[in-house]
Amino acid sequence: MVKVKYILGICMIVLLTATGWGLSVWHQDAVQAKGTDIIASIPVKADVAYVSDDFTLPDKDNDKPVYDKYTIAQRKEKGLPLTYGKTRDYYYGDHVAYLTFDDGPNDHNTMEILDILKKENIHATFFLTGQNVKQYPEVVKKIYASGNAIGVHSYSHDYKKIYVSPKAYTDELLQTEQLIYDVIHVRPIISRAPGGTKGHFTKPFWQAIDDIGYIEVGWNALTGDADGTGKTPEKSVENVRTQIAERPYLNKHLVVLMHDAYGHHATVEALPNLIKMLKDQGYTFRVVTTAIPPSW
Ligand SMILES: [Zn+2]
């Protein structure tokens, strides 16, 4: 009996020591998890497609977010192609809507939008600025893991810096690419020029982004959440409805520009009604991939 008590005592000591050690490790993890390094080191799984080494994309994968396994720097190192070098296969559907959000991510509007998309069982595309990727890596991870698509939207969003030269533009693109790669371990392939390419891109800019394997993605409809015409949720939805009615060709292929930066909560509030309006008109929703046709 004494022997049994003795063994039980030893077991308790071992158990308590192990629990204490476990708790202290857990505590350390929780503290360190606030740092970007730890966030980046936790692998994340997502249902995504990858372009092959020569940039081809299997047809069956053209409705998933598309990424490259390599950064452009890694492609250079390995001697792999850096650009498409041929015409892409476009996906043309009917009543296809691409919802796009620029200027994020952040821990407020972006998170709310992700919740709405999940509830509606649809996916959208987020064009991120490097400075916000740096600040909210955990939100980047959430966008990726939830099956929504990620594109690049410069680092600084400062027109005076990025449009000085094609090199200034691609430098910020690659800087942001690296920041995103550090978090999700894949490279986005799509990008969107802040303020759009019109009046910003000259021919050498198009060449420069093509040379580093990026697809520039425009839009053909907008809620007006950033230009003052769609300040309220009601007006945002109404604007898109009017644009579709006035330009029936948008029925084929609708790319809606919105913003999820701070100060755009009206966009979050508009989203459920915007989605409902589009669903009622027979739209289905896709993420932007390399197969997206030109917006116009
Ligand atoms: Zn923007």
Image: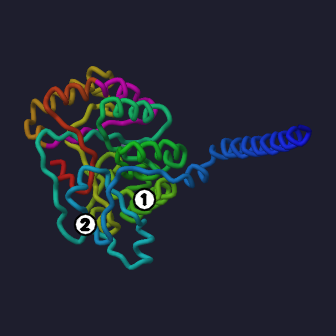
- The quarter of the picture showing ligand 1: top left
What amino acid type should be assigned to the residue bearing mark 1?
A: Val
Q: Which mark is residue 211?
A: none
- Gap between marks 2 and 1 measured at Cα: 16 Å
The residue labelled by disc 2 is 56
> Tag 2's secondary structure?
loop
- Quadrant the N terminus occupies: top right
Image: magenta residue range: 253-272
Q: Position of residue 145 (x, y in %)?
A: 42, 46
Left or right: where does residue 94 sit relative to residue 156?
Answer: left
Disc 1: which residue? 186
Q: Kindly give the residue lying farthest to the front in the view shown.
A: 1
Residue 121 located left or right of residue 243: right
Could you tell me the amino acid type at mark 2?
A: Thr
Residue pictured at 31% horizontal, 40% vertical: 123
Per the image, label 1 sits on a secondary structure element best described as: loop
Q: Residue at x 75, y 41 (%)?
A: 19
